[in-house]
Image (cartoon, rainbow, N blue to C red):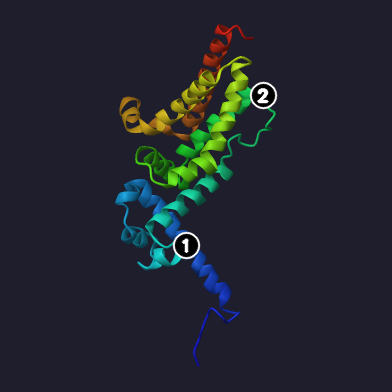
Amino acid sequence: MSFDDTTDPQMRPVHDAEVADTRRRLLDAAGEVFARRGFRDATVREICGLANANLAAVNYHFGDKAALYRAVISETSREMTEHYPPLMGIAPDAPADARLHAFVRSMMLRMFQPGRAAWFGNVMAREMIEPTEVLDSLVGDTIRPMYQMLMGIVSELLGPGADEDQIRLSAGSVIGQCVHYKHCRSMICRLVGEDLYQPDRIEQIARHITTFSLAAMKTLREERGGR
């Protein structure tokens, strides 16, 4: 008598759990490899070896390497946004300076927390330098809504009369300060040491970026004659 675990009701939960476990291991392994090598240099063989999965598993679960990469970006982006939401749980109507600090802190934590967040930050850094077709959907689904949120905060801080260019440039300056610590990490560590990237120092940097940005926007507002 033949045995088919896809039709046996007692075996299906085990089968489904194994499928889900393999898929998760592939995503985790792929994230590490993509973070280390980038999409183009990553190989399915290395990913499957790290995941302890059959070489055909990527095709079975995702279709191909490109689809696996899209899944890594999409699912991990969602997880990071849920774990570190842009306002970190504070009320949307909280004072603008508090919302700016929450936004900066959220961004820094997504880039520098250990574990999954760490390799996701590296994947994203590579995507900025060597963009793939995934970047378009990522911008539309995740990055643009966050950017528009930051633009709203900055507009409020700059006050009435701030034009679109000043708002955009100020928002870019906030983001630029954050990503500086990501993209220039190798140089920064050689200049001041790895200690700067300890968790408590990341929090300190987030506070500094917020304070520095608030002071700059206050000056811009005053120069324009605003209060």
The answer to whether residue 122 is above or below residue 11 is above
Counting from the top left corner in percent of width and height, residue 62 is at 44, 61
**Residue 99 quadrant:** top right
Q: Residues within 10 Å of mark 1 (few under 14, many from 20)?
A: many
Q: Secondary structure at mark 1?
A: helix
The answer to whether residue 213 is above or below residue 60 is above
**Residue 101 quadrant:** top right
Q: Residue at x 63, y 15 (%)?
A: 160
* Residue extending furthest toward the front: 164
Q: Residue at x 36, y 51 (%)?
A: 33
Q: Which residue is mark 1?
A: 23
Counting from the top left corner in percent of width and height, residue 72 is at 45, 52
The answer to whether residue 56 is above or below residue 11 is above
Q: Residue 177 bears which disc, if any?
A: none
Viewer-proximal residue among 64 and 187: 64
The answer to whether residue 40 is above or below residue 101 is below
Q: Amino acid at mark 1?
A: Arg
Where does the C terminus fall, quadrant-wise? top right
Q: Is residue 196 visible?
A: no
Q: Is residue 189 visible?
A: yes
Q: Residues within 10 Å of mark 2 (few under 14, many from 20)?
A: few
Q: Secondary structure at mark 2?
A: loop
State the separation of the CA atoms marked 2 and 1: 42 Å
Viewer-proximal residue among 159 and 87: 159
Counting from the top left corner in percent of width and height, residue 179 is at 43, 31
Q: Which residue is mark 2?
A: 95
Q: Residue at x 35, y 30 (%)?
A: 184
Q: Residue at x 37, y 68 (%)?
A: 56
Q: Amino acid at mark 2?
A: Pro
**Residue 118 quadrant:** top left
